[in-house]
Amino acid sequence: MSAPAASWRPVAAPLAFAVAAAVLTRFVTDRPEEAAAMARGIAGPTTWPTIMLYCVMLFALAWAVQRVALVLRRREQPAGAAMPVVAGGPRVWLGIALVLAYGFSLPTLGFALATFIYILLWLPLGGIRAPLQIALTSIIGTVMFLYVFIKLALMPLDRGAGPIGEFSVALYRLLGIY
Amino acid sequence: MDVFINLFHGLLTALQPYNFGIMLVGLAVGVIAGALPGISFVNAMAMALPFTYLMTPLTAMVFLGGIYAGGVFGGSISAILINIPGTPASLPSCWDGYPMTKRGEAARALTLAIAASATGGMVSALLLTFGAPPFANLALAFDQPEFFAATFLGLVSIIAIAKATPWISLVSLFGGIVIGSVGVDPLYGLPRLTFGVPALQNGINFVVVMIGLFALGEVLEMLGKRSHGQNVAHGVKLKLPSLKELWALKGAAARGTGIGCMIGMIPGAGATVGAVIAYGVEQQASPRGAEFGTGVEAGLVAPEAAKNATTGAAMIPLLTLGIPGSAATAIMLAALVLHGVTPGPLLFATQTDMVYTIFASLLLANLCMIGAGVLVARGFASLMKVPPTVLGAFIVVLSVVGAFGVRNNIADVYICLSFGVIGYLMKRYNFPSAPLVLGVILGPLAERYFMTSLANYDNDLTIFFTRPISATILGFAGLFVLWALVPDMKGKVIRLIAGKSAP
């Protein structure tokens, strides 16, 4: 990385927080006239979040000043504070995509099918290669969750849309959950 | 002397097989519900409420008391073993309990937590027995400014926890408070920071944030490390810590218990505030304060003792004044009212047997919690034998279901997953997540007390400093900040002077 790029990087995060907080103070409510009419003295519906956003701004600026001071003094390697401390890599991003896909597919695929597919894909991603272990863990895990959360805890988890919903109901009947 | 006789009678009644059995069932339900993320013990108490119709008022209170005592502890099991706080009050248990698990000391962490929780709970139950009436007067003196001051003290304790990175931690804390204020304003009914998204009008629930940040963030980190072998806590065998070990932690347990008892008596403050303050105070008081967050026993024992010490103390305003200080005690009040029992000073005179049986069963519940806690923790600990990849997959499913279960709302799942990604990024860039979670938990409480104080006292900001108790608590908060920061600042000044004077 070039030296100029390295010099602004330590203050980028705190300044981003300060700017985001400053921008948010303008959008605390989309009905500012109503908020103003409700306010009595300093107390109003937007008072608390606005004060808190100003606090975020203030402390983010203090954080930026601290970073700048560290750069100027060259006491420490300030960029290190923003360097990744946790392992990353494509597998983690694939994991994030898989977890998000699992959650967002729940209304469409239903809890049973989405959970089964999710576990089936997650295990190889985590390094498990034995097909039998993957298949058994996915099936047993899904059935266990169905029993605990749908049969015992009676949670209204999504069954899925259209034919998948009918499939889920048939599966529940087969397992004795319904 | 009357107290001892009444307590003895109470113990005899509580030990009757039916009452004792009901208490054990409640305890088991509480520990299990507390240990399962997303299914809080408060939910378990609410679900158990209809069952109390079939019971006498005394049995109902014994049952709910068992769930309460067990549930407050139960949250720490998942916090210590898989870094998911089962209840908000178990948040500090993640900070030093989970690092112990990572070090392969899960059994030690769990047994210390059980012993500390039981100690705190029993001392608190004794306080309830002997000190209820005088302390009730203190609780009566609390109004909205005092509640705000107590919550503020809880927020301030983050200074001690995060003094190494104060500005980032404060950004994180206030960011959390902002997140906590998303949704329809409770006083005025106006949506705030919702940007026209209907799902955000219900607000962002702290449990959802907590599950996302801690559980999903941890799982993604685990995936990055790609260790699909046996987990660190393989072969957890639970045994109670030796007396020598416990004695060495007596200071931490005593401080935690004291703080928990004091905070528990304040209606509205609750176990979370007590546990967080106890952690902050312990970090200052402990000679190993600088190592907190790396798996220090005192950092686990103090908040554990504090959160269970709030259980008995929280029942003081409930039984003596009829003021429920938390959701759990509100359910207990509902149970009493459903059975035609009116809590208050008269209760002690007219239904002495019942009152002292409740005290005795709370004592017994905390004693039996050691057994129940060991059994449930052993069951949970067997999870640790599962390879991390499989465990990670199950934690994600558990987190998704837990987030959904908070309000049976799929939007909460999306919010939880979003915070999971944020949690991972926070870990990746070393941005502290604990202050953010604390802000999301305590922010809405602080806002409610702050705004109602202003509404009740003509928008007078000085009310927080002119009311003696509020001013005293805020004074404590100020002293706490100084106590936390002065040694560090002094060290920096000395280093600066030494650096300048050096040739």
Image (cartoon, rainbow, N blue to C red):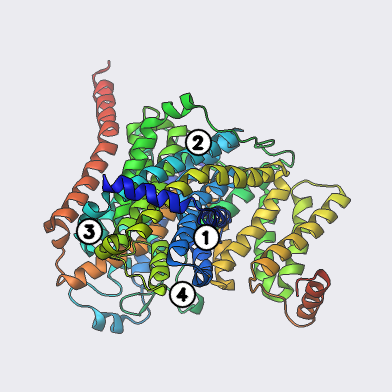
Q: CA distance from mark 2 to mark 3?
A: 33 Å
Residue located beneath label 1 in the image:
B40
Residue located beneath label 4 in the image:
B202
At label 1, the amino acid type is Ser
- Of residues B165 and B206, the one nearer the viewer is B206
Disc number for residue B365: none
Contact flag, marks 4 and 2 (Cβ < 8 Å)? no
Please report whichever mark, 4 or 2, sits nearer to the chain's N-terminal start: 2
Task: Find residue B442 and report its horizontal and vertical position in percent.
Answer: 37, 58
| Both marks 1 and 2 on one chain | yes
| Residue drawn at point x = 57 percent, y = 49 percent | B78
Task: Find residue A116 and report its horizontal and vertical position in percent.
Answer: 77, 63
- Of residues B233 and B46, the one nearer the viewer is B46
Disc number for residue B112: 2
Label 2 is found on which chain of the structure? B
Please name which of the two marks, 1 or 3, marks the residue nearer to the observer.
Answer: 1
Please, what secondary structure does the residue beneath circle 2 have? helix
| Residue drawn at point x = 38 percent, y = 41 percent | B279
Please name which of the two marks, 4 or 3, marks the residue nearer to the observer.
Answer: 3
Please report whichever mark, 2 or 3, sits nearer to the chain's N-terminal start: 2
| Both marks 2 and 3 on one chain | yes
Is A113 situated above or below B29?
A: below
- Of residues A173 and B115, the one nearer the viewer is B115
| Both marks 1 and 4 on one chain | yes
Disc number for residue B146: 3
Please name which of the two marks, 4 or 2, marks the residue nearer to the observer.
Answer: 2
